[in-house]
Image: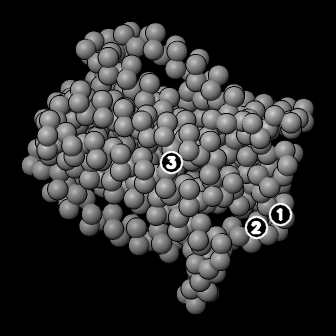
Amino acid sequence: MRNILIETQKLLSGKFAKNAAYVYGAQVAGGVAGFALNLILIRHLNIEDYGLFSLYTSATMLFASFIHLGWLDAYSRFGARYAAEPVFEAVRKFFFGKILRSMVLGAGLPLIFAGWISTRLYERPQFSIYLRLAILNGVILCIWSFLNLDFQVRQRFKNYLYAQLLLSASRLTGIVFLFFFVGLSLLSVISVNFLFPLFFLLIYGWQMQIFSTKKAENIELPSAIRTQASEFRAWVLLSTVCNSVIGNIDLSILAHYHPNQTLANYGVAARLTLPLHMAMTALGMVMLPKLASNKNIELTKSQLRTLIKYIFPVSVLLLIACYFLPAILARWAGAQYASSQNLIQLFLLSSVIVFITNPPSVFLIAWGHAKMLAYLNLVQLIVDLILDLLWIPSRGAIGAIQATLVVYLIGTVFAYFQLYRALKGKLLPAK
């Protein structure tokens, strides 16, 4: 126990701790704002409309996570790797251009087929207008993600904090305005979720010169970096698509087999546990730039050992919280969502698994093992789809999250096995 306290003290001092504080502050603020926003909607939208809003949110996140066709995820490694070098501005320009061009294709085709998807997959023809808004909102969130990722790879975590606070505050302000002065409806809520982030993205993005590439005009990007980035991105794309589907397909399949009330219960459990889930992923945001830019293998191993010693005691405390929190959150949601308590507990458990898996997964990305992760994610996707199709028709929302838990555990076992190999010197950074 004394060694754990000593290692924890090391983590809580220095630049790493300061950056972690900014990221955790941003994630907690975003989570709390999202929690407050969703609590208002849960209590004041009827259950049918909240079910459709949950489907809209899931579709938005699905499209936002893959319409960049893998280039955004590839930038997380290459941006961090070259952030301190003169060629960085050329690297940034290369990836930003690829992301913008990919979004035209990634969003264009779904926009064309939105009517077919709404009718055949969701069996809700009237949802097509909301689906198109979800796709466009995914484009906005993708650009927001590049802005935030740009701050992370440059290790400007204070700017990352400000951006997250701005986005969270804008959405919450819009919903509060509707609640007091206009009234909440499905269309008005979705409009606020679409227009406010767009408005503040234009203001903040322009101020931070996210759209400017002037600094890269006289810098030539070496062809070797282009080749490496393209090869890495090809495998990252497979991982991205797999992870996007695993994380967001549940509500789409639920929509095919179950009514809006089931979607609402699933959405309530997902949104009320969002603050914890966001906090669980914050550690990886701080780790990735640090590990990707670190050329010293032994130092990286030492950092990982320290983090692992810290993670498991914290995980025990989180598991204890998983026992007490569901009843409290279900009570806050109201009587119409009383049956969501078991769902909330499973969502909390999935967040703890994500927290445990985060360090070895980020380390594999930082070391460039995109091909290995792509194969893992493909296996996870196949397992997830099989379990979803077997369990969702009969078990409903419970079956959906149970399938996700199985998939997450597969990733945990694999990631820690590869971490063990790395610590033993059997796994080295990819070239």
Q: Which residue is mark 2?
A: 301
Vertical side of 228 occupied by 322: above or below: below
Give the Cα separation between the discs numbered 2 and 1: 6 Å
Provide the residue designation for mark 3: 408
Whether residues under marks 2 and 3 lie with C-beta atoms below 8 angstroms apart, the answer is no
Q: Residue at x 69, y 67 (%)?
A: 304
Give the residue drawn at x 75%, y 54%.
Answer: 292
- Image position, residue 364 (x, y; %): 70, 51
Q: Give the camera-side residue of 333 and 389.
A: 333
**What x and y, as percent, mark residue 394?**
27, 31
Q: What's the residue type where badge 2 is placed?
A: Lys
Residue 107 appears anywhere in the view = yes
Callout in the foreground (3, 1): 1
Question: In the figure, is residue 366 to the left or right of 110?
Answer: right
Q: Quadrant of the C terminus?
A: top right
Query: Residue at image x 46%, y 64%?
Result: 25
Q: Are marks 3 and 1 in contact (CB under 8 Å)?
A: no
Name the one closer to the observer, 383 or 173: 173
Query: Residue 249 sits in which quadrant?
Result: top left
Instruction: In the rendered structure, find residue 2 and report the number of the disc placed on it.
Output: none
* Residue 368 image offset from top left, x and y in percent: 76, 46
Assess whether mark 1 and mark 2 are in contact (beta carbons under 8 angstroms).
Answer: yes
Q: Quadrant of the N terminus?
A: bottom right
Mark 3: few/some/many CA within 10 Å (<14, 14-19, 20+): many
Q: Amino acid at mark 1?
A: Ile
Mark earlier in primary sequence (2, 3): 2
Q: Alpha-carbon distance for marks 2 and 3?
A: 24 Å
Disc sitting over residue 297 in the figure: 1
Decide if residue 13 is on the left or right side of residue 350. Answer: right
Q: Nearer the viewer, residue 235 or 294?
A: 294
- Secondary structure at badge 3 equals helix
Q: Residue 347 location, x and y as percent?
A: 36, 51
